Amino acid sequence: MKLSTEAKVGSMSVIAFLLLAYMIVHLGNFTFGDKGYQVQAVFGQVNGLKQGNILRYAGVDVGQVKSVEVLPEGVKVTFVIRPGVKIPEGSIFRIGSDGLVGEKHINISPPNQSNGFLGPNAIVRGEDIVGLDQLIASSDRVLAEVHDLVKSLNEILGDDKVKAAMKETILNAKELTNNLNAMSASLARMAQNNEGDVHTMINNLSIMSGSLRDVAGRVDVMMAGVDNDGQTVRDLRETIQNIRSTSQRIEKMAAALDGVVTDPETVTNIKETLRNARSVSEKANKMLTKVDSISVKGGFEVLHDNNTGKYRSNADLRINTSPQDFAVIGVTGIGDGSKGNFQIGKGSEEFAGRVGVIESKVGMGVDTQLGKQLKLSLDVYDPNDVRVKLRTQYQLAPDTFLVGQTDNLNKSSEKNTYIGVRQTF
């Protein structure tokens, strides 16, 4: 069926009215149900905030400004927050803008912790922002201070005495540079003229280092001989056994003759021989016991002080003369103010005490084993200026250890801490 012109015009009017109503409701943020709830914030200044500006929580639009009211203590801003949106207590309310000259808005930052949420008609304190006028005022103060500083510098540099002093300083620096150039030239000539002596000194150092290497090799050979499984100890053990066997044979021979010989002087000699043979045999037995229990263990370590960047090398020998008795001989700081160590001690692997010379000073120390891999040592030495050294040693492998050592533990100004590696052999 065909519509009349009036009907067409009326239909178009109704459609236009519906579109207008839709735009007003949705673009104007009108709602017909629950309109949300209000929250109030008091600011020192709002910097152009007005009714209708957006309210954002963590960057999300959650409401808008309903009203802006001036109070004696500041400016009260009332917001309308959308239904279902909860703002945690302790949130921070700030005034921001979209760009440098964009529209103002309220930005809400969530707190780190919160025990609840803001209820309807809650009142909070907004955080004031630094306005452009305040920044300009601050800039003016800074510029004024810079101007005063420049003025002071001009007054100082403009003084004739200061100018003369600066000129003299420059001349002195120039003269010093010339002297340094002359000295470097003299050193160069000295090095050139004494080049032969320098070569001779280097050759002597090379020969000396070779001799030291040979000595070190001989020391290694000696150490191998002193070792419990070395030839020297085996020879010594065999010699003592021969002495014991000989003394026993002599004792038997003297005992056999004791009942046969009747001469008093001869009898006296035989008895003296028996006593001597028995004494030699007993001493040989004691010596064999000591030789069997002697063992030598050497150690070398390199330590580093992270604060000073310096390295330290130490070496030592531990000579066990019995399961409970031992001696320690060593050197601390090889090649850099070397200090000697010689201590005798007594104890077991779990706990032992030492007394003697520690870093060239009289002292004493204790060693204790904490578990299977960790060892703790404490040394106290130098009676005239008491020093305490604490040392820990952790076993990484059968003959390799991680070492931590603190010197002068009781003197904070002289305390040094070293970390390094120890190798035993």
Image: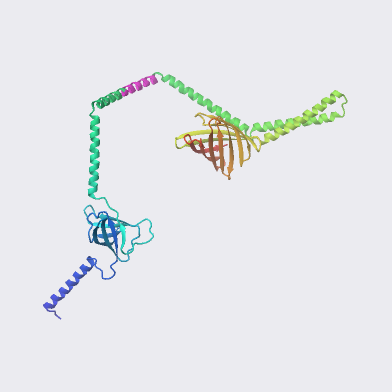
Residue 29 drawn at (x, y percent): 24, 66
In the drawing, does residue 264 fall left or right of residue 135? right
Query: By what rule are the colours in the image chosen?
Result: rainbow
Report the residue at 17% width, 72% height from top: 17
Quarter of the rendering occupied by the C terminus? top right
Quick check: can you spot residue 60? no
Q: Is residue 14 above or below residue 107?
A: below
Residue 181 is a magenta residue: yes
Q: Which residues are magenta?
A: 176-192
In the drawing, does residue 103 fall left or right of residue 333? left
The one of 13 and 151 positioned closer to us in this rendering: 151
Q: Is residue 206 above or below residue 299?
A: above
Q: Total label count?
A: 0
Report the residue at 18% width, 73% height from top: 15
Q: Is residue 32 above or below residue 176?
A: below
Residue 364 drawn at (x, y percent): 58, 34
Residue 155 is a magenta residue: no
In the drawing, does residue 158 fall left or right of residue 305? left
Report the residue at 80% width, 26% height from top: 272
Q: Quadrant of residue 220?
A: top right
Q: Residue furthest top?
A: 193
Magenta stretch: helix, strand or loop mostly: helix
Q: Residue furthest bottom?
A: 1
